[in-house]
Image (cartoon, rainbow, N blue to C red):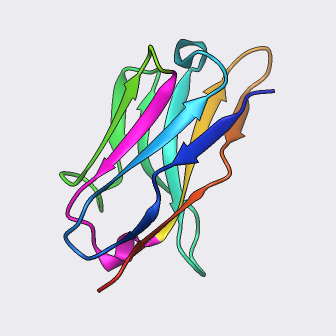
Amino acid sequence: QVQLVEFGGGSVRPGGHLRLSCATSDPIQSFSAMAWYRQAPEKERELVARFQNMDTIVYADSVKGRFTIFRDIAKNTLYLQMTRLKPEDTAVYYCTADRALPAATTYWGQGTQVTVSS
């Protein structure tokens, strides 16, 4: 069973920055895609950033230019560097990893809380 463990959430003032980490139990290269999602209170879960086919990167419009998704293959870790944080970035952030075979499966981490408040 694939395990994803997120680290790095916390509370920060507007304009601040945080780096989220997602450690995987399996090699990153074994996944077809990895991503960060978030869910704010009373809102739908939304995609934040995604490595598609582990080479194409997609960002939500709301985070373009502020957030960066990157990975460290040697450490089997996915990161989300978040800068110029806004109160509307407050949410639980989840790491996901996709496998296409033997059956299409998406694995989820437990989530980490990010709170942006003055």
Residue at 34%, 82% (x, y): give it.
117
Question: Left or right: 77 with respect to 11?
Answer: right
Reply above or below: 69 against 52. below
Instruction: Specify whether residue 47 is painted magenta.
Output: no
Numbered disc total: 0
Q: Where the N terminus falls, by quadrant?
A: top right
Q: Residue 15: where, in percent of width, then height?
A: 19, 70
Most foreground residue, 84 or 105:
84
Residue occupying the point 40% across, 22% down: 72
Residue 107, x across and y down, in percent? 70, 37
Is residue 73 shown left or right of residue 6?
A: left
Instruction: Reply above or below: 111 against 78.
Output: below
Residue 60 % position (x, y):
35, 53
Does the stretch in magenta take in 88? yes
Which quadrant would residue 105 be assigned to in this image?
top right
Where 20 sits versus 9, above or below?
above
Where's residue 91, x and y in %? Answer: 50, 69
Q: Which residue appears farthest toward the bottom when viewing the image?
A: 118
User: As drawn, is 108 to the left or to the right of 113?
Assistant: right
User: Which image quarter is the C terminus in?
Assistant: bottom left
The residue lying at 65 percent from left, 19 percent from top is 26
Stretch of the chain drawn in magenta: 76-90
